[in-house]
Amino acid sequence: MDREKLKKGLGLADNMTLHLNHPVGHFVGASPVADPRAAIRERTAKDVAEYGRDGMREIERLYRLYSSRGEGSADALSTLCEKYPKANRTGCAVMYAAQRASGEERVKLLKRAIDDYGDCFYGDGAQVGAYARLYLAGELARSGDTAGAEKLYGEIRTLYPNAHAHNGKPLSEVIPAAK
């Protein structure tokens, strides 16, 4: 870089020195998802390979039953978790369960969503891992653990920079309001 030209262009004093910083590294844990739709297709293909077409139909049926909160919905969640523990829709159902729960049960389910289903997606592209961190950060902040909440907000910013809420709003815009 032409330091003298840059210093002049930026209006810097003679006693100031320009440095070029190019950090190199990789994400630990989840990788940022640039194209959620492509990630959903990949995740679905993984589930089809694991559970087959018949399994996918049953997973979807159980997920819809659980989501409807109708008769047998609690059993549907149990069956999803026991029979299809790695399925994308199971991760979404666990996240819904966390949103419906309260207290320690909610915290437990949010941690499970983060640990076991961070790579799951809702059909609209919202990512379970990011969403669970947002909700858990809110729980921690309300209980006075601001450091724990800030750590999770930081993970959303670094591990899920393109994550969005169900309404399409980037979580990066939701985080400050959630503090």
Image (cartoon, helix red, strand yellow):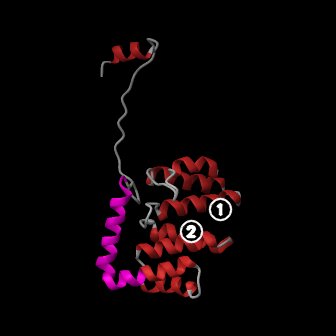
Within 10 Å of the Cα at label 1, are there few (<14), some (14-19), or many (20+) other Cα atoms?
many
Residue at which label 1 appears: 139
Within 10 Å of the Cα at label 2, are there few (<14), some (14-19), or many (20+) other Cα atoms?
many
Residue at (36% x, 52% y) in the render: 34
Residue at (45% x, 54% y) in the render: 160
Query: In the rendered image of this protein, does residue 154 appear above or below residue 78?
Result: above
Query: In the rendered image of this protein, does residue 112 appear above or below residue 146?
Result: below
Whether the magenta-drawn stretch holds residue 40 is answered as: yes
Residue 165 x/y as whole percent: 52, 57
Residue 76 disc label: none
User: Judging from the image, what secondary structure is the residue with disc 1 in?
Assistant: helix
Residue 46 x/y as whole percent: 31, 72
Residue 72 x/y as whole percent: 56, 88
Please name the amino acid that badge 2 sits on: Leu
Residue at (47% x, 60% y) in the render: 126
Residue at (46% x, 86% y) in the render: 82
Relative horizontal placement of residue 108, taking residue 114 as reference (left or right): right
Cα–Cα gap, marks 2 and 1: 10 Å
The answer to whether mark 2 and mark 1 are in CB contact below 8 A is yes
* Region rendered in magenta: 34-59
Closest to the observer: 46 or 62? Answer: 62
Residue at which label 2 appears: 110
The rendered magenta stretch, by its main secondary structure, is classed as helix
Closest to the observer: 92 or 168? Answer: 168
* Quadrant including the N terminus: top left
Please name the amino acid that badge 1 sits on: Glu
